[in-house]
Image: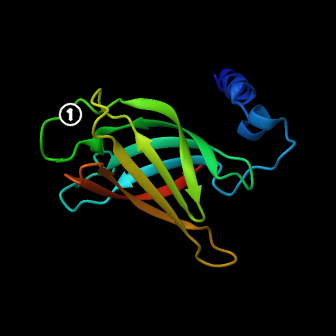
Amino acid sequence: MRRTFMLAATAMIGLTPNASAQENDGAIPPSDWQGNYALTRTDPRIRTLAGADLIGMQVIQDRGADTATVSWDARQAICPDPLDEPCEWIGANGTDTARVIGDTLVLALRLSPDDSDPAILVLQRRPTGARRPARFAGFITNARAGWDIRFDATQTL
């Protein structure tokens, strides 16, 4: 059984694409934004980590570029009121272009078929020091400013 697990793990590693090599054949180094992120909703009404799971996303960006390609998927905590029934936004996903302005990434999320009121995700990188990884936090709001969701983010492998 251990040998089967090792073979499966080796196969998965071989199938995992290297984003920077895939996007630019290594000619331009990736930016500090490049990587995978887990966004976790910060709301005192949510009691579990699973209930706070907001968005998973992958950012691909060349160093020095002012845009990035972001693949994302909305999860359990995406609904405006976490105490309500699950909403239609859970499972929404896409690949879109984000604007990068210094230590801030801004992305329009198409959560629903109604294009007249998109959600806007703002993710900020906050440097913490030379030997400690950056801290990430942000918010999502709609264009009409009818709701907002605050979150923390971690860069994952």
State the residue position of label 1: 87
The x and y percentages for residue 7 are 72, 23
Write down the quadrant of residue 134 in the picture: bottom right
Residue furthest to the right in view is 27
Q: In this view, does 118 lie above or below 123?
A: above
Residue furthest to the left in view is 84
Residue 39 visible, this orientation: yes
Q: Is residue 156 above or below residue 127?
A: above
Q: In the image shown, does 12 or 92 lie closer to the viewer? A: 92
The x and y percentages for residue 86 are 19, 34
Write down the quadrant of residue 85 in the picture: top left
Q: Is mark 1 on a helix, strand or loop?
A: loop
Q: In the image shown, does 23 or 102 lie closer to the viewer? A: 102
- Residue at image location 58% in from the left, 76% down from the top: 128
Please, what is the three-letter code of the amino acid marked with disc 1?
Cys
Total number of numbered discs in the rendering? 1
Q: Which colour scheme is used?
A: rainbow
Residue 157 visible, this orientation: no
- Residue at image location 48% in from the left, 37% down from the top: 72
Q: Is residue 77 left or right of residue 14?
A: left
